[in-house]
Amino acid sequence: MMTLQDIDWEHWTPVEDATLLFVIRGGRILLIHKKRGFGAGKINGPGGRIEPGETPEECALREVEEELRIRPLNVDYAGLLQFQFVDGFSIRGHVYRAADFEGTPVETDEAIPLWCETDALPFERMWADDPVWFPHLLAGRRFSGRFIFEGERMVEYRVVEEEEEFECET
Ligand SMILES: COc1nc(N)nc2c1ncn2[C@H]1C[C@H](O)[C@@H](COP(=O)(O)OP(=O)(O)OP(=O)(O)O)O1
């Protein structure tokens, strides 16, 4: 079975680059029930794949607007997630948090909005990696994580807190 140590992470290039953006306000976090795309059927943050010519932050804002019709405000970079699947697929997630937003979240073709208390998250309906990095996200810390997945099963992971300056180029 593939392990974290089998991968040269410094030279690792993902098949896909994607984003996640979490609005966290007043003890609640805005999640979505994902209707299509990778991870359809799960609860996740709004987000999606980065398009050519787009920065990760531009993608994060575009995806939230497309999926929930809101505009996040006071956005800051939160972390980086590197997912390697044993079948060869890989995806890198650039994670952002926002302290506020304009508009009203609505259901779209892509997502159903879901406000959750930050101390009662529905991890059983989320990706298996989420419980290991959400504590950093919710605490306002920067983090990075490396993960091996076999299908939807998380085989191994390493998540660390990062310095403020840490950010990744695509
Ligand atoms: C493997 O673990 C993962 N955990 C979490 N929390 N989120 C993940 C994981 N793997 C991928 N993601 C996220 C990253 C992106 O937000 C989406 C994938 O992008 P998606 O397929 O939704 O991309 P779109 O461009 O929106 O695609 P469609 O236009 O076809 O909907 O999953």
Image: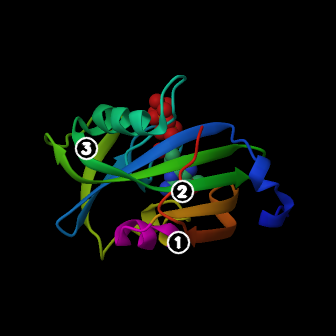
Disc 1/disc 3 C-alpha distance (Å)? 25 Å
Disc 2/disc 3 C-alpha distance (Å)? 22 Å
**Between 15 and 96, the one nearer to me in the picture:** 96
Q: Secondary structure at mark 1?
A: helix
Q: Quick one: label 1 or label 2, which is nearer the N terminus?
A: 1
> Which residue was labeled with disc 3?
72
* Label placed on residue 94: none
Residue at point 42% right, 39% down? Answer: 57
Residue 129 makes an appearance in the image: yes
Please name the predominant secondary structure of the magenta segment in the image. helix
Q: Which residues are the magenta region?
A: 132-141
> Which residue was labeled with disc 2?
166
Q: Secondary structure at mark 2?
A: loop
Q: Is mark 3 within 8 Å of ligand 1?
A: no
Whether residue 90 is situated above or below residue 81 in the rendered picture: above
Queried whether the magenta region covers residue 137, the answer comes back as yes
Task: Please rate how many residues cluster around mark 1, counting C-alpha atoms within 10 Å: few if below 14, some from 14 to 19, many from 20.
Answer: some
**Between 43 and 27, the one nearer to me in the picture:** 27
> Which residue was labeled with disc 1?
132
Residue at point 45% right, 37% down? Answer: 36
Whether residue 58 is situated above or below residue 28 in the rendered picture: above
